[in-house]
Image (cartoon, grey):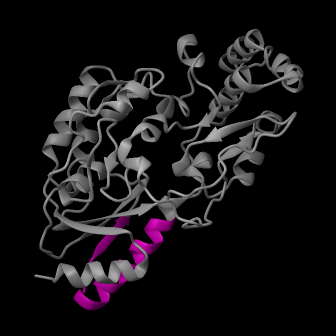
């Protein structure tokens, strides 16, 4: 069996913040939890979470029959940077902190270096993922990267939930780590902070009310949610901002990567002026232009943001969109115009 400490030492040299080991055993508990949430209709796209796809998501052997070990890793993205680039006449919409840059790709790059070391030293076969087709949070919890916060995000003891997760799936056996004994205790500040009350009970999110989930959903946003949407162009981290553990995290003095650098906010008027191709070219290599991102939803979000933050400079643009061919965009524009 491979010495895990040697592997972890090499991971630190590669710039990975934490590396832990677990077996490739199926995540039956996670599968059961997801099935229960599908039955409660808590997903925006329940067709994606069929019993078969959920089974594959929670058992890596359906993708890699030779898998014996899951090496889990995290990279902290927390920096102390200005969060709003708004200027007079140019209101900005906020980007969720985790996607200011493409930390997923950065972590994959670092994991690939580690995987090449595994292959050279131990002739290991491998696959590398980050934000990939397996239940990353369950793997991170079982390996001891962190524990589930009541907002359903993994909390690392040092880096809080300001982390992205990644994995190496390999055919070699490595001594596994143990899960952490920590949890949130009686704290429920994240639940209290959620403006839409999307955290309906500890660890369970009603994604039909979660701004993070709705930000890329192409449908019409309910008025009570638009009323508390605020300046969020893409994503939401209010539950993370409220977490006491996150408040103790020391920020890095510089970004961990420059891949897909978008920054903390984007001009709302610029977003409304450009088309899909221009948008994807301008912000390439970031999650906000990934293949699954719906650009009309981003325009809808921009209009909702303007309803909260736009001044006289936004009135003409918002009014123009009230007659848009896309009925969902037009509805958001009418709502924003009434607010303004």
In this rendering, position of residue 304 left or right of residue 144: right
Q: Measured along the vertical axis of the image, is residue 72 above or below residue 99?
A: below
Residue 335: image location, x then y, percent: 70, 12
Q: Measured along the vertical axis of the image, is residue 10 above or below residue 191?
A: below
**Range of magenta residues:** 106-128
Residue 101: image location, x then y, percent: 59, 57
The residue closer to the viewer here, 312 or 185, is: 185
Residue 56: image location, x then y, percent: 25, 47
Q: Measured along the vertical axis of the image, is residue 9 above or below residue 250?
A: below
In this rendering, position of residue 186 left or right of residue 167: left
Q: Which of the 4 quarters of the picture holds residue 302?
A: top right
The residue closer to the viewer here, 271 or 47, is: 271
Taken as a whole, is the magenta stretch helix, strand or loop? Answer: helix
The residue closer to the viewer here, 129 or 245, is: 245
Q: Measured along the vertical axis of the image, is residue 332 above or below residue 45?
A: above
Q: How many marks?
A: 0
Residue drawn where x is 65% and y is 31% of the image: 231
Residue 22: image location, x then y, percent: 17, 63
Residue drawn where x is 13% and y is 61% of the image: 178
**Residue 270 drawn in magenta:** no
Residue drawn where x is 85% and y is 24% of the image: 317
**Residue 108 drawn in magenta:** yes
Q: Is residue 44 visible?
A: no
Q: Which of the 4 quarters of the picture holds residue 34?
A: top left
Residue drawn where x is 14% and y is 41% of the image: 29
Q: Is residue 192 visible?
A: yes
Rendered-image quadrant of the C terminus: top right
């Amino acid at each position: 069996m491979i010495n895990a400490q040697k592997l972890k030492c090499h991971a630190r040299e590669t710039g990975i913040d934490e590396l832990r080991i677990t077996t490739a055993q199926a995540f039956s508990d996670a599968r059961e939890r997801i099935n229960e949430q599908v039955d409660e209709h808590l997903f925006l796209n329940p067709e994606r979470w069929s019993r078969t796809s959920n089974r594959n998501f929670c058992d890596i052997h359906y993708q890699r029959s030779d898998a014996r070990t899951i090496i889990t890793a995290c990279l902290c993205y927390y920096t102390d940077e200005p969060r709003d680039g708004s200027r007079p006449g140019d209101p900005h919409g906020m980007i969720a902190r985790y996607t200011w840059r493409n930390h997923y790709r950065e972590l994959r790059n670092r994991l690939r270096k580690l995987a090449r070391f595994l292959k050279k030293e131990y002739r290991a076969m491998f696959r590398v993922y980050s934000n990939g087709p397996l239940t990353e949070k369950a793997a991170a919890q079982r390996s001891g990267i962190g524990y589930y916060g009541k907002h359903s995000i993994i909390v690392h003891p040092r880096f809080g939930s300001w982390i992205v997760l990644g994995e190496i799936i390999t055919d070699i056996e490595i001594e596994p780590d143990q899960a952490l004994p920590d949890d949130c205790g009686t704290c429920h500040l994240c639940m209290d902070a959620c403006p839409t009350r999307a955290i309906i009970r500890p660890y369970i999110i009603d994604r039909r009310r979660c701004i993070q989930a709705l930000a890329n959903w192409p449908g019409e946003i309910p008025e009570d949610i638009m009323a508390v949407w605020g300046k969020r162009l893409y994503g939401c981290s209010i539950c993370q901002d409220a977490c006491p553990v996150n408040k103790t995290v020391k920020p890095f003095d510089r970004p961990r990567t420059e891949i897909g650098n978008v920054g903390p906010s984007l001009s709302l008027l610029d977003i409304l002026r450009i088309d899909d191709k221009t948008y994807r070219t301008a912000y390439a290599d970031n999650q906000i232009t990934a293949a699954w991102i719906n650009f009309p939803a981003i325009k809808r979000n921009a209009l909702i943001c303007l309803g909260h933050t736009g001044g006289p400079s936004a009135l003409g643009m918002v009014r123009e969109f009230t007659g848009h061919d896309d009925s969902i965009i037009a509805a958001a524009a009418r709502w924003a115009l009434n607010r303004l």
